[in-house]
Amino acid sequence: MRFSRLFTLALALPLAAAAQQITVSTAASLTDAFKELGPKFEASQPGTTVRFNFAASGVLLQQISQGAPVDVFVSADQDTMDRGAAQKLLDADSRKNFVSNSLVLIEPGKEGTGIKSLQDLTNPKVNKIAIGKPATVPAGRYTQQVLEGAKLWGVLEPKFVQADNVRQVLDYVSRGEAEAGFVYRTDATLLGDKVKIVLTPAGHTPVSYPLAIVSDSKQKAVAQNFINFLFTDAAQQVLSKYGFGKP
Protein backbone atom coordinates (compact mmCIF):
# COMPACT_ATOMS: atom_id res chain seq x y z
CA MET A 1 0.00 0.00 0.00
CA ARG A 2 2.76 2.39 0.93
CA PHE A 3 4.59 1.70 -2.36
CA SER A 4 1.35 2.29 -4.27
CA ARG A 5 0.88 5.71 -2.65
CA LEU A 6 4.46 6.74 -3.37
CA PHE A 7 4.13 5.61 -6.97
CA THR A 8 0.93 7.61 -7.36
CA LEU A 9 2.62 10.66 -5.86
CA ALA A 10 5.60 10.28 -8.21
CA LEU A 11 3.25 10.25 -11.19
CA ALA A 12 1.39 13.29 -9.93
CA LEU A 13 4.45 15.50 -9.50
CA PRO A 14 5.32 15.85 -13.21
CA LEU A 15 1.67 16.53 -13.99
CA ALA A 16 1.58 19.31 -11.42
CA ALA A 17 4.70 20.87 -12.88
CA ALA A 18 3.33 20.63 -16.41
CA ALA A 19 0.19 22.44 -15.28
CA GLN A 20 2.28 25.60 -14.88
CA GLN A 21 3.47 25.62 -18.51
CA ILE A 22 2.13 28.19 -20.96
CA THR A 23 2.48 28.44 -24.73
CA VAL A 24 2.96 31.85 -26.33
CA SER A 25 2.36 32.09 -30.09
CA THR A 26 4.20 35.16 -31.28
CA ALA A 27 5.19 36.97 -34.46
CA ALA A 28 8.51 35.72 -35.90
CA SER A 29 10.10 39.16 -35.62
CA LEU A 30 10.11 38.79 -31.82
CA THR A 31 12.10 35.53 -31.88
CA ASP A 32 15.40 36.78 -30.50
CA ALA A 33 13.91 39.11 -27.90
CA PHE A 34 11.51 36.47 -26.56
CA LYS A 35 14.21 33.79 -26.42
CA GLU A 36 16.08 36.09 -24.06
CA LEU A 37 12.97 37.04 -22.10
CA GLY A 38 11.73 33.46 -21.58
CA PRO A 39 14.32 32.46 -18.96
CA LYS A 40 13.92 35.81 -17.20
CA PHE A 41 10.16 35.25 -16.88
CA GLU A 42 10.69 31.69 -15.61
CA ALA A 43 13.17 32.97 -13.02
CA SER A 44 10.56 35.45 -11.80
CA GLN A 45 7.88 32.72 -11.59
CA PRO A 46 9.39 29.61 -9.90
CA GLY A 47 7.74 26.41 -11.14
CA THR A 48 6.48 28.03 -14.35
CA THR A 49 7.76 27.35 -17.84
CA VAL A 50 7.01 29.22 -21.07
CA ARG A 51 7.15 27.68 -24.52
CA PHE A 52 7.23 29.85 -27.65
CA ASN A 53 5.77 29.19 -31.07
CA PHE A 54 7.22 31.61 -33.66
CA ALA A 55 5.62 32.12 -37.08
CA ALA A 56 3.79 34.67 -39.20
CA SER A 57 0.89 36.25 -37.30
CA GLY A 58 -1.73 34.99 -39.76
CA VAL A 59 -0.44 31.43 -39.54
CA LEU A 60 -0.52 31.56 -35.74
CA LEU A 61 -4.12 32.76 -35.75
CA GLN A 62 -5.07 29.91 -38.09
CA GLN A 63 -3.49 27.45 -35.67
CA ILE A 64 -5.44 28.93 -32.75
CA SER A 65 -8.71 28.79 -34.72
CA GLN A 66 -8.02 25.10 -35.40
CA GLY A 67 -7.68 24.36 -31.70
CA ALA A 68 -3.95 24.64 -31.07
CA PRO A 69 -3.33 24.81 -27.27
CA VAL A 70 -2.11 28.41 -26.96
CA ASP A 71 -2.31 30.72 -23.95
CA VAL A 72 -1.05 34.08 -25.27
CA PHE A 73 -1.13 35.42 -28.83
CA VAL A 74 1.20 38.24 -29.94
CA SER A 75 0.57 39.70 -33.41
CA ALA A 76 2.70 42.03 -35.52
CA ASP A 77 -0.39 43.93 -36.63
CA GLN A 78 -3.79 45.04 -35.43
CA ASP A 79 -5.75 43.48 -38.32
CA THR A 80 -4.84 39.91 -37.40
CA MET A 81 -5.70 40.54 -33.75
CA ASP A 82 -8.99 42.11 -34.86
CA ARG A 83 -9.84 38.95 -36.81
CA GLY A 84 -9.08 36.84 -33.77
CA ALA A 85 -11.32 39.03 -31.63
CA ALA A 86 -14.14 38.83 -34.19
CA GLN A 87 -13.91 35.03 -34.06
CA LYS A 88 -14.13 35.13 -30.24
CA LEU A 89 -10.74 33.40 -30.03
CA LEU A 90 -9.26 36.00 -27.67
CA ASP A 91 -10.06 37.52 -24.30
CA ALA A 92 -10.93 41.08 -25.32
CA ASP A 93 -10.29 42.53 -21.85
CA SER A 94 -6.69 41.27 -21.86
CA ARG A 95 -5.74 42.90 -25.18
CA LYS A 96 -2.97 45.50 -25.01
CA ASN A 97 -0.65 47.22 -27.45
CA PHE A 98 2.77 45.82 -26.69
CA VAL A 99 5.59 47.32 -28.80
CA SER A 100 6.11 49.18 -32.09
CA ASN A 101 8.42 48.65 -35.04
CA SER A 102 9.11 50.09 -38.49
CA LEU A 103 9.21 48.66 -42.01
CA VAL A 104 12.46 49.05 -43.96
CA LEU A 105 13.72 48.25 -47.43
CA ILE A 106 16.99 46.31 -47.47
CA GLU A 107 19.52 45.05 -49.97
CA PRO A 108 22.52 42.70 -49.57
CA GLY A 109 25.32 44.24 -47.53
CA LYS A 110 27.82 43.51 -50.29
CA GLU A 111 27.36 43.85 -54.04
CA GLY A 112 23.98 45.55 -53.74
CA THR A 113 22.50 47.39 -56.69
CA GLY A 114 22.63 50.76 -54.94
CA ILE A 115 18.91 51.23 -54.30
CA LYS A 116 18.07 54.74 -53.14
CA SER A 117 14.30 54.92 -53.67
CA LEU A 118 11.25 52.75 -54.27
CA GLN A 119 11.40 53.70 -57.94
CA ASP A 120 14.84 52.06 -58.13
CA LEU A 121 13.13 48.70 -57.62
CA THR A 122 12.00 48.93 -61.25
CA ASN A 123 15.65 48.83 -62.36
CA PRO A 124 16.38 45.73 -64.50
CA LYS A 125 19.28 44.96 -62.14
CA VAL A 126 16.72 44.19 -59.45
CA ASN A 127 15.47 40.77 -60.49
CA LYS A 128 13.91 39.55 -57.24
CA ILE A 129 12.23 41.40 -54.38
CA ALA A 130 11.50 39.34 -51.25
CA ILE A 131 8.29 40.15 -49.39
CA GLY A 132 6.15 38.42 -46.79
CA LYS A 133 2.99 36.77 -48.11
CA PRO A 134 0.35 39.51 -47.71
CA ALA A 135 -2.36 36.97 -46.82
CA THR A 136 -0.61 35.79 -43.65
CA VAL A 137 2.44 38.01 -42.98
CA PRO A 138 1.74 41.51 -41.60
CA ALA A 139 5.02 42.84 -43.04
CA GLY A 140 3.76 41.72 -46.43
CA ARG A 141 0.57 43.74 -46.00
CA TYR A 142 2.54 46.80 -44.89
CA THR A 143 4.71 46.34 -47.99
CA GLN A 144 1.65 46.11 -50.22
CA GLN A 145 0.28 49.34 -48.75
CA VAL A 146 3.58 51.12 -49.44
CA LEU A 147 3.92 49.91 -53.02
CA GLU A 148 0.27 50.43 -53.90
CA GLY A 149 0.53 53.99 -52.58
CA ALA A 150 3.59 54.50 -54.81
CA LYS A 151 1.72 52.97 -57.80
CA LEU A 152 4.38 50.25 -58.01
CA TRP A 153 2.64 47.09 -56.76
CA GLY A 154 1.42 45.92 -60.16
CA VAL A 155 4.65 46.96 -61.88
CA LEU A 156 6.86 45.04 -59.44
CA GLU A 157 4.65 42.02 -58.84
CA PRO A 158 6.49 39.77 -61.36
CA LYS A 159 9.68 40.27 -59.30
CA PHE A 160 8.18 39.22 -55.96
CA VAL A 161 9.49 36.23 -54.06
CA GLN A 162 6.88 35.62 -51.38
CA ALA A 163 8.12 34.33 -48.03
CA ASP A 164 6.36 32.66 -45.10
CA ASN A 165 7.65 35.25 -42.60
CA VAL A 166 10.02 38.22 -42.31
CA ARG A 167 12.93 36.07 -41.19
CA GLN A 168 12.73 34.18 -44.47
CA VAL A 169 12.77 37.49 -46.35
CA LEU A 170 15.86 38.45 -44.37
CA ASP A 171 17.56 35.17 -45.31
CA TYR A 172 16.84 35.62 -49.02
CA VAL A 173 18.39 39.08 -49.07
CA SER A 174 21.37 38.31 -46.79
CA ARG A 175 22.31 35.34 -49.00
CA GLY A 176 22.00 37.42 -52.15
CA GLU A 177 19.08 35.36 -53.45
CA ALA A 178 17.05 38.57 -53.79
CA GLU A 179 18.32 42.03 -54.63
CA ALA A 180 15.88 43.70 -52.24
CA GLY A 181 13.38 42.90 -49.52
CA PHE A 182 11.02 44.46 -46.98
CA VAL A 183 11.50 43.53 -43.32
CA TYR A 184 11.22 45.16 -39.92
CA ARG A 185 14.06 47.34 -38.71
CA THR A 186 14.57 45.00 -35.75
CA ASP A 187 15.22 42.09 -38.13
CA ALA A 188 17.60 44.03 -40.37
CA THR A 189 19.79 45.17 -37.48
CA LEU A 190 20.34 41.58 -36.30
CA LEU A 191 22.57 40.72 -39.26
CA GLY A 192 25.01 43.62 -39.04
CA ASP A 193 26.72 44.26 -42.36
CA LYS A 194 25.13 41.26 -44.11
CA VAL A 195 22.25 43.51 -45.17
CA LYS A 196 21.95 47.24 -45.69
CA ILE A 197 18.93 49.37 -44.80
CA VAL A 198 18.39 51.67 -47.77
CA LEU A 199 15.00 53.21 -47.02
CA THR A 200 12.33 53.55 -44.35
CA PRO A 201 9.20 53.89 -46.48
CA ALA A 202 6.11 55.82 -45.48
CA GLY A 203 2.54 55.21 -46.55
CA HIS A 204 1.55 52.24 -44.41
CA THR A 205 -0.38 51.60 -41.23
CA PRO A 206 1.82 52.13 -38.14
CA VAL A 207 3.55 48.89 -37.13
CA SER A 208 2.03 48.16 -33.73
CA TYR A 209 2.08 44.78 -31.94
CA PRO A 210 -0.94 43.84 -29.79
CA LEU A 211 -1.19 40.81 -27.51
CA ALA A 212 -4.03 39.01 -25.74
CA ILE A 213 -4.88 35.89 -23.76
CA VAL A 214 -6.46 33.13 -25.84
CA SER A 215 -10.06 32.42 -24.81
CA ASP A 216 -9.51 28.65 -24.47
CA SER A 217 -6.37 28.99 -22.35
CA LYS A 218 -6.30 26.65 -19.37
CA GLN A 219 -3.68 28.81 -17.66
CA LYS A 220 -5.14 32.32 -17.79
CA ALA A 221 -3.60 33.45 -14.51
CA VAL A 222 -0.11 32.44 -15.62
CA ALA A 223 -0.76 33.93 -19.06
CA GLN A 224 -1.67 37.23 -17.41
CA ASN A 225 1.51 37.04 -15.34
CA PHE A 226 3.51 36.71 -18.56
CA ILE A 227 1.79 39.74 -20.08
CA ASN A 228 2.41 41.75 -16.91
CA PHE A 229 6.07 40.70 -17.01
CA LEU A 230 6.49 42.06 -20.54
CA PHE A 231 5.62 45.55 -19.29
CA THR A 232 8.19 45.53 -16.47
CA ASP A 233 11.29 47.70 -16.74
CA ALA A 234 13.52 44.62 -17.07
CA ALA A 235 11.56 43.24 -20.01
CA GLN A 236 11.24 46.62 -21.69
CA GLN A 237 15.02 47.06 -21.55
CA VAL A 238 15.50 43.80 -23.42
CA LEU A 239 12.93 44.76 -26.05
CA SER A 240 14.54 48.16 -26.48
CA LYS A 241 17.93 46.46 -26.95
CA TYR A 242 16.49 44.59 -29.92
CA GLY A 243 15.14 47.80 -31.41
CA PHE A 244 11.47 47.65 -30.46
CA GLY A 245 9.81 50.92 -29.56
CA LYS A 246 7.08 51.87 -27.13
CA PRO A 247 3.53 50.95 -28.25
Image (cartoon, rainbow, N blue to C red):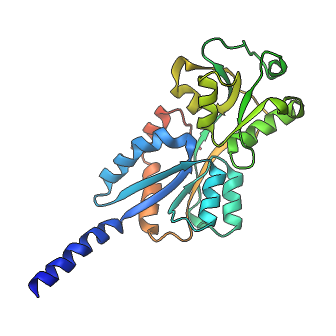
Query: At x 62% / y 37%, what residue is drawn?
Result: 166
Identified at 63% across, 65% down, the residue is 65
Check the picture and name the quadrant holding the C terminus: top right
Q: Quadrant of residue 122?
A: top right
Residue 54 rendering spot, x and y as whole percentages: 53, 48
Query: Is 19 placed above or below 212 here?
Result: below
Residue 217 as seen in the image, left or right of residue 180: left
Q: How many marks?
A: 0
Vertical position of residue 85 compared to residue 230: above or below? below
Instruction: Answer with left or right where residue 190 lies relative to residue 114.
Output: left
Q: Position of residue 220 (x, y in %)?
A: 46, 68
**Quarter-wise, where is residue 150 in the image?**
top right
Is 52 displayed left or right of 85 in the figure? left
Residue at the far left in the pictured view: 2
The residue nearer to you, when weighing 181 against 235, is 181
Residue under the point 61% across and 12% down: 110
Of the pair 40 and 94, the residue shown nearer to us: 40
In the image, 22 versus 67, the foreground residue is 67
Screen quadrant of the N terminus: bottom left
- Mark yes or no: residue 184 visible: no
Where residue 160 sits in the image (x, y, percent)? 77, 32
* Residue 15 visible in the snapshot: yes
In the rendered image, residue 75, in percent from the top left (x then y), is placed at 61, 51
Give the residue displayed 20% in from the left and 77% down from the top.
9
User: Can you say whether 56 is above or below 6 in the image?
Assistant: above
Residue, far bottom: 1
